[in-house]
Image (spheres, rainbow, N blue to C red):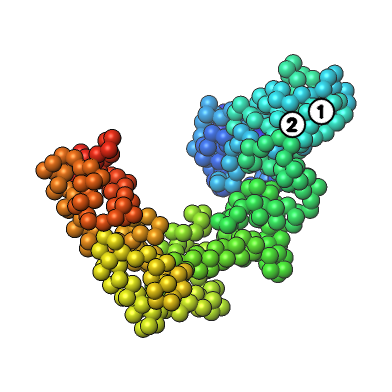
Amino acid sequence: MPIARFFVMKGFGTVITGTVVSGNLSLGESVEILPSGLKAKVRSLQVYNQPVERIVAGQRAAINLQGVEASQIERGEVIVRPNTLVPTTLLDVYLEHLPTAERPLKNRTVQRFHIGTLLANATIQLLDKEELVPGEGGFAQLRLDRPVVAMQQDRFVIRGSSHIQTIGGGVVLDPYPEKHKRFSEAVINDLTLLRDGNKEEMLRHYLLKAGRGGITQEDLLRRTALLPGELQLLLKTMDGKGEILYIDPERSKVIHLSHYHQLKGMVLRQLKEFHQRFPLKSGLAREELRTKLPLEMDTRLYQMLLNDLLQSGEVILEKDLLRLSTHSVSSRDEKGLVKRVEEAILKGGLQPPSPKELAEEWSEEEDHLQTIFDHLVHQGTFIKIKEGIYLHRHPFHQLKEELIHYLQEHKEITAAQFKEMTKVSRKYMIPIIEYFDQIKLTLRVGDKRILRTGRTS
């Protein structure tokens, strides 16, 4: 209810008056005054100077409040049930410029905005036109200089700088929009739906816009201006059509099925990519998988997804590790091949064979051997110097210690001296010394390397 008047009545305290726009209110209920956020309790109610126990939409009412002083209230504020509405400074609207207006309404003009009993300055950003000529309508986004409380389908008036002449008006389409770019086809389509669509289409719009995190019924009520009973009935209809899923047992949060299927696809893709990178691992820990998914997805939704995938047999959980049902853990022969690869690279010292060279020598698929190399890098057994050059950690760390000791004693080393130290060809020597630069062990100064300050390991 927008507050039209407020005063102190002797023996009663603070009284506010106004017209109930929607819903109802009873004696003893708690209320919130917005945008200030003050909380109060209903002490008594009157309609046409007669005491009543309940007021409803359309009635001109007086409310006696307990717990708030009249000096704390401003005209234009709104009284609501706690935690139902949120103040906003941005509104998507359909705006009509009156035929009697003297001049076109241009983009980004500032006019007086009147909604309920509140006045504010509004910068009008036209979204589908350069200007509105008198008698024309269009979509706009209003940026207000003070917070207002508005609901979808609320009517408003636009006045000129004189505060007297009405030059236009319209209806609120979205009270909590994002900032828009002008002439966006997607934005215009969305606003057209909010203007012309039925309640189910409007609800579907907000469910889709909510994304993969879902949306609470409380937020849907706030955005759509539906009554609780209407929302429940529409959600029941959509649930019957298989369009939505409830995320929690209390049915307080809901997600559109298209987003749910997207999340399931993401889980399956993450597991597939994990198996491709680490074919020798049994699976991925469920908490590690959780970190690879969208942040907006809460724990309940994640658990619901896993339960569905486990029940369908697409995913298997063993020892708290998740894997695709199509993934088979490496056989004994595969583990033997891993051991052969490790031994070959260790034996090669600082001039080991590449995956391609081993594949040719052993008549193995190069891609298959590459996955084993990647696995051993991830495990810390191999160090990837560059594409095609992998060192076993033992000769690598031995060389690293030798280089540190040399630089501590001699202060610098040339490429020729490093080649003498390693006894390897330039094919290996250059990538290895450059790798030490990359990991910030050494610093190149001209044609020499020095030990970086503070590096002893």
The amino acid at mark 2 is Leu
- For the image, the number of numbered tags is 2
Is residue 255 visible from the viewing direction of this image?
Answer: yes
Is residue 452 visible from the viewing direction of this image?
Answer: no
- Say whether disc 2 or disc 1 marks the residue closer to the N-terminus: 2
State the residue in front, 255 or 274: 274
Q: Which residue is painted at 66% across and 55% down in the image?
A: 208
- Answer with the quarter of the image where residue 148 lies: top right
Separation of residues labelled 2 and 1 (CA atoms): 8 Å
Q: Which residue is painted at 66% across and 24% down in the image?
A: 121
Give the SS element for disc 1: strand
State the residue in front, 193 or 72: 193
Where residue 214 appears, x then y in whole percent? 58, 57
Residue 348 as seen in the image, left or right of residue 112: left
Circles 2 and 1 in contact, beta carbons < 8 Å = yes
Mark 1 burial class by Cα count in 10 Å: few <14, some 14-19, many 20+: many
- Answer with the quarter of the image where residue 211 lies: bottom right
Q: Which residue is mark 2?
A: 126
Q: Quadrant of the N terminus?
A: top right
Q: Which residue is mark 1?
A: 132
The amino acid at mark 1 is Leu
